Image: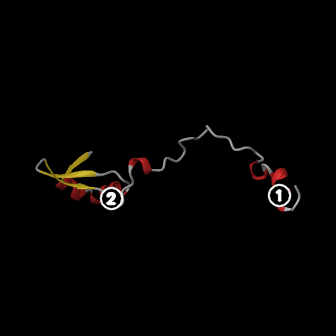
């Protein structure tokens, strides 16, 4: 976890708030002594963070995805068997 001194935190407050809002907590120290831990109000757990694209290239959607099984399903809705 990153630690920032008070002066550094004051000069970079906007950037640090954005960092905390994204779930990256940090510590603010005074004279090298940790004083507070800054976290988002509703910071997601690491297990809850979305990982977009983590299966990229590993899954292929069939070209007939929207009509798969239509021959078997349609008769069930039309009263046929």
In the rendered image, residue 21, in percent from the top left (x then y), is placed at 36, 58
Residues 66 and 36: in front is 66
Q: Is residue 71 left or right of residue 38?
A: right
Q: Residues within 10 Å of mark 1 (few under 14, many from 20)?
A: few
In the rendered image, residue 10, in percent from the top left (x then y), is placed at 22, 59
Residue 13 position by quadrant? bottom left
- Count up the numbered dots: 2
According to the picture, the residue beneath numbered tag 2 turns out to be 40
According to the picture, the residue beneath numbered tag 1 turns out to be 76
* Residue that lies at the very extreme toward the left in this rendered image: 31
Q: Residue at x 22, y 47 (%)?
A: 3
In the rendered image, residue 37, in percent from the top left (x then y), is placed at 23, 54
Q: Residue at x 61, y 37 (%)?
A: 58
Residues 36 and 4: in front is 36
* Residue that lies at the very extreme toward the top in this rendered image: 58
In the rendered image, residue 30, in percent from the top left (x then y), is placed at 13, 53
Nearest to N terminus: mark 2 or mark 1: 2
SS for dot 1? helix
37 in relation to 54, above or below: below
Residues 32 and 7: in front is 32
């Amino acid at each position: 976890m990153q630690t920032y001194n008070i002066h550094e935190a004051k000069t970079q407050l906007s950037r640090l708030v954005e960092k905390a809002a994204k779930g990256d907590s940090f510590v603010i120290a005074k004279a090298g002594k940790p004083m507070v831990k800054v976290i988002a109000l509703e910071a997601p757990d690491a297990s809850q963070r979305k990982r977009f694209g983590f299966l990229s290239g590993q899954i292929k959607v069939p070209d007939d995805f929207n009509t798969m099984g239509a021959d078997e399903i349609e008769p069930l809705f039309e009263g046929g068997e």
